Image (tube, rainbow, N blue to C red):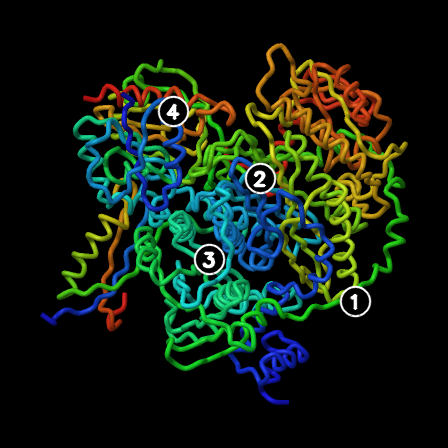
Amino acid sequence: MGDKAMFGVLVEVQLRPGIADPQGATIQRALPALGFDGISAVRAGKAFRFEIDALDEEEALLHARVVADRLLANPVIEDATVTVTPANGESGA
Amino acid sequence: MAPRIGVVVFPGTNCEHDARVALESLGASAELVWHGSSDLSEFDAVVLPGGFAHGDYLRPGAIARFSPVIGAVEAFAAAGGPVVGICNGFQVLCEAGLLPGALQKNRGLRFLCQNVTLEVANDTSVLTRGVAVGTRLVIPINHFEGNYTCDAETLQRLQEEDRIVVRYAENPNGSVDSIAGVSNEAGNVVGLMPHPERATDVLLGSTDGITLLEAFIASAATKV
Amino acid sequence: MSEEVVLHRALGLTDSERDEIEALLGREPNHLELALFAVMWSEHCSYKSSRIHLKRLPTEAPHVLVGPGENAGVIDAGDGIAVAIRIESHNHPSAIEPYQGAATGVGGILRDIFTMGARPIAVMDPLFFGDPTEAKQQWLIEGVVAGISGYGNSVGVPTIGGDLTFDPCYAQNPLVNVLCLGVLPTERLVLGQASGVGNLAVLLGSATGRDGIGGVSVLASAGFGGESAEEEAAKRPSVQVGDPYEEKRLIEACLELLDLKLVVGIQDLGGAGLVCATSETAARGGVGMDVDVSAVPRREAGMEAYEVMTSESQERMLAIVTPEDLARVQEVCARWEVRSAVVGRVTEPPADGPGRLRIMDGFDGEVLGDVPAVALADDAPLYQRPLERPADLDVRLADDPGVMPAPADCGDDLLQLLFDPSWVYRQYDHQLFLNTVEGPGGDAAVLKLAAPGLPDSKRGLALSTDSNPAWCSLDPRLGTAATVAEGALALACAGATPKAVVNCLNFGNPEHPEVMWQLSEAIDGMAEACRGLGLPVIGGNVSLYNESFGRDIDPTPVIGSLGLIEHLARRPPGVTMPAGSTLVLLDGGVEVDGPSLAGSRWAVGVCGHRNGTLPPLDLEGHRRLINFVGALVAEAVAPAVPGVEDLVVGIHDVSAGGLAVALAELAVRSGVGFSVSGITGHHQLFSEAPSRVVVATNRPKFLTQRAESAGVRARILGTAGGDRLVVEGLVDLDLAATTASWRNRLPQLLDELAPA
């Protein structure tokens, strides 16, 4: 015991390819008014950050993956990507 | 004896009294059931009413599906009991995996509270048993996330297995195949976005919801 | 200059106010005490500029259970049911962050209503913006409507109506008013007061953060403009964020506590937060209170006592509870997942003076501040600010819009005045609770008088919110009187008897003598109309400093009117006209040849002519019209009498846009054209002279006879039918094209036509 360390987790949830994304489409339609014509493939999503105690990065990732798939994303329409970093911020991504 | 219908209440649910009042006005006996309850076996049918369970935070229904009562709804449905999820209740049933698909934000990205015309598409589900296919009903919708979405394979299965229960005559929210409500394979679990309980009083403008709720109460009465 | 002098000014207190505080305390106030006085004596909390004038309003009637000064006005609706109503502004917060500003406005007023023991069952939102085609206004409109929708729908209270007004005077200073109505079994009525020495003050709901620190004094009591983007950004952190889910649980928990009779008194935390709730409950109960700031649950570390006491964090209530009931209170709260913490104790007043509000660090710890509760709540200075009639007013009154050329085509002008507000109200749940008989878009909203836990009743409620800033800018007295008159008439059109009004007075900077004159005149106009129509004023809110870049908004008194329908058995006829029916104009106003167009939408909106002398208002004639119309429609909503055909089959009051808009709205809403003759010119078509109603009837002869015997002039205008809107010699429009224009106009202005 006592070997656990804290890891920072970033979960990004986005609609699966092929699922209509009216938010993304609306943002994209607004961009020319801002002077940007060269932006395409806008997709809206959500990001979640939390901290997790785990033995190592692998375990942190495993647990975060379960949280992402079972709660944060709806697998019917969404995918989640999970990024884990040591909470003291020594590694950056 | 009047069939007993359990109306499930999550924190944030707000249509529970409306559902109860409408069902009782049609001769059923309806009781509110707190989401912490894990046994629904005393009831003849179960309603998951509309509202904003857990504030709709994260996604509508995403947190409600972890409530103890969802296990009870699963058991009740597995035993063939009639279950209907209205609006937020439909979203909860999808999140819980009791119905296929998901409900995304409306195509227009705005909340919509208005009357819509529905077309009954199936006459075998617990909500439409005995109602002629093609019957048109004017019933209000009241949602931000009512845009029914599923993959092509699921849609094909729903169509082939006659599980699309009601369709919008004019699609208000971008739902695939204008789907307003679907059922599970057995037809005893139905979810729909429109609110039939809001169309049960001539003072409020439409009584077309009675057609659906009476079919549901009849299903409850014949539950064995 | 000592640092402390700088401090009180920085907090918004004048030098004389600071001296008064020192005299009240008998010593120098410390920093915390100064901060408490600063928020409690701010304009927003103390009404120090307006209170002297508000005293002139009539507030009493036999059916009034609670008048102004409490959290909400309450009337007895009969059948053991009481109705609570309140209106408020959330103008400044909405200008800075439209979504959260509007959302927290809804949240705040709901708490005022359930504080009285009432279940909130309806919200209405009168909104005022600048030119809707401008990007900034679109951002405001979209944000405000989304905020009301996002909060109101989720918390589960239907938004059943409101108003939408566009005028350039609101471009920098939008107005977001919100009215809420609640119902309760009369016996459950509670007041926000503390009593019983030794009782506990329990804080319910959200944890306290730094949101809205100084909000009421900094935001609601200062104008905008003349500041850099950075300065405007610096105001942002003090905007509160709403949590409708917390509020929903708070409502259910509080109503359950009241049902179980577990609270002695209850008070919401709104502007000025905990200091307001504790000092007001103590002052009303004639007791003192010790507050332990260390016991207040916090969302942020390192908060100072003054921050905890003045924070405007949302979704919080203060319940006064006996020590014996505490455990049960905590149990109810836990079930609804509502946080509860004992933060105060009711104390005995000292023998020689009023009860003290003591702010302490632990009940046995250091006393951080010690002031008489009543001094904070009631002893703010009252100002008789200078009044001055605007110097240019006579010139404006003499400049009549009659000089404007007649329109080349009245039909074209009519189309400009015609818009369907459903783009707004479709975003609001207006049907929850199965009470909404007549929703948004008509003359008045109509509700069944019903809610879980209420005794059965056959009665119905009618509600309307009205305003007429174009009129009030020319003549605030007549304009406000006419607004009261319009609201009462809208209720009559639904078959209701007007019972009470509430008001939200949105004005400019009270330090401008012209603004104070407008306010004083408006209050006199309201008083005159309410006396003339027999209506008590049971609540109000004053929002001052609605100015930007030195320019005040037009005076904008908003009147909320509440009426009772004796027996609501059938849907009111509403704004419709069946084909074949006869259209009759009922008129209780002053008979004139060429009615004035001053202040009309045609003059102001189409011609940009904002001057002239308003058409007169005859309160006696108006009252006769209200009684007559109210009785007619009451017959149409009561149970049908076999063999007797109703006299009224459709009805619409004549208000914004005059007769032209009234007729056109009847047409587009019923899908039926009309043919009308005998209208002599655009004056008669577009004048907004008060006291008029268009009625559709199948028994015109009998109707006109009855009208005449009731002292109301009746004139047959024409008939409903066909697919054209025809006013002989003036208007000839295609029904389908007019309907499309009506429906698309608002989305078009907002660039919001839905993608196909």
Camera-nearest label, 1 or 3: 3
* Marked residue chain, label 3: C
Task: Examine the rendered structure and indicate whether residue C102 appears above or below residue C653.
Answer: below
Camera-nearest label, 4 or 2: 2
Camera-nearest label, 4 or 3: 3
- Provide the residue designation for mark 1: C386
Q: Is residue B178 left or right of residue C108?
A: left
Counting from the top left corner in percent of width and height, residue B194 is at 40, 30
Task: Examine the rendered structure and indicate whether residue B218 appears above or below residue B86.
Answer: above
**Dot placed on the residue nearer the N-terminal end, 3 or 2:** 2
**Dot placed on the residue nearer the N-terminal end, 2 or 1:** 2
Looking at the rendered structure, the kind of residue marked 4 is Arg
- Provide the residue designation for mark 2: C161
Q: Which mark is drawn over residue C265?
A: 3
Q: How far apart are marks 3 and 2 (CA)?
A: 31 Å
Q: Which mark is drawn over residue B167?
A: 4
Camera-nearest label, 3 or 2: 3
